[in-house]
Image: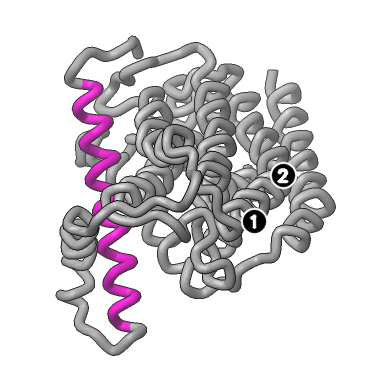
Amino acid sequence: MGTGGPSAALLAVGLLALAAVMAASAHGVLAERASGGSAARGLTRPFSEAARLLRQRRRATVAADRLLWRSGGAGLGVIPLLMVAVVPVGGTALFDSAVGVVWFNTADVIVWALVWLLGWGANSTYGLVGGYRFLAGALGYELPLMFALTAPAVAAASLRVSDVVAAQRDLWFVVWMPVAFVVMCLGIAGFSVWGPLSPGAATDLAGGVLAELSGPDRLLVQAGRYLLLAAGSAVAVCLFLGGGSGPLLPEGLWLLVKTVVLLGVLVVLRRRLPLLRPDRFLEIGWLILLPATLLQLLVVSVVVVGGR
């Protein structure tokens, strides 16, 4: 697979946007059902909310650093595009880098700075505490995530995402790398500030890093979170679920189907799992997830070396 042109870029961006909208609609349906509303209203909830925020007036706190604050929000919409640039869609990737797995991990780490800027730039107590909470949680998931990303790369003997997809023709990696896959999903929830790993945006902080956002600024950040969730899911599909491989349907459609299914699982789990305190998750990350991921990587390495 080579580096794609404009068609690959359009396919990747279209996949990302469609998956993000479907995730937002699914979350709207679940939220409406929980409050006794209708599913139809939930499906249109993302669009009505977007229209409301576009009409809402922007506000700013006293002495806010608007450049840093808004740079953090805008960056959350750019990073997902960088993530899907290495995802092979329809046989080509926009940027089929020889170090695509590292590229994705680098983009994920940049999210740390962007979320922190949201909290710091607002010059708000709630935002600042939310930023610290996010960083504390990120310390718990990031190192296990790095080793989880290494496992499929070792099995494929390549850091190129398209090579990892090609190595799963006979068997998806999730079958014999379940621990790495679960850690990957936790990492996606973490850098998307999602579900149990979203204490930085919790209601006990009035929204934390989101507390002072309004109007288009809030819309941009909320859209960025869904786009991050979709981009992370698309990369996870490529690394563990065979990418676009599948019978009858085109590769691009299979990639979309798998991504949406994984997104659906993450959306459902958001409402079923409790919020984890950063200090508690840090213990889980370092004492349970990290050793388990290292053991998973050891098993993969032994299998790969033994098969040569």
The crowding category of the residue bearing disc 1, from other C-alpha atoms within 10 Å (few below 14, some 14 to 19, many at least 20), is: many
Above or below, comparing residue 216 to residue 25 in the picture: above
Horizontal and vertical percent position of residue 228: 42, 43
Residue closer to the observer: 192 or 288: 192
| Residue 139: mark | 2
Q: What is the secondary structure assignment of the residue under circle 1?
A: helix
Residue identified by numbered label 1: 129
Res 204 seen here: yes
Image quadrant occupied by the C terminus: top right
Figure check: 222 above or below 248: below
Q: Which mark is residue 177?
A: none
How crowded pointer 2 is (Cα within 10 Å; few <14, some 14-19, many 20+) is rated as some
- Determine the residue positioned at 23% across, 46% down: 18
* Above or below, 263 relative to 87: below
Disc 1/disc 2 C-alpha distance (Å): 16 Å
In x, y percent, where is residue 52?
Answer: 19, 62
Q: Specify start and end residues of the magenta stretch as a single range.
A: 8-33
Quarter of the image with the N terminus is top left
Furthest-front residue in view?
A: 62
At label 2, the amino acid type is: Leu
Query: Can residue 234 be seen here?
Result: no
User: Foreground residue, 295 or 200?
Assistant: 200
**Which SS class for mark 2?**
helix
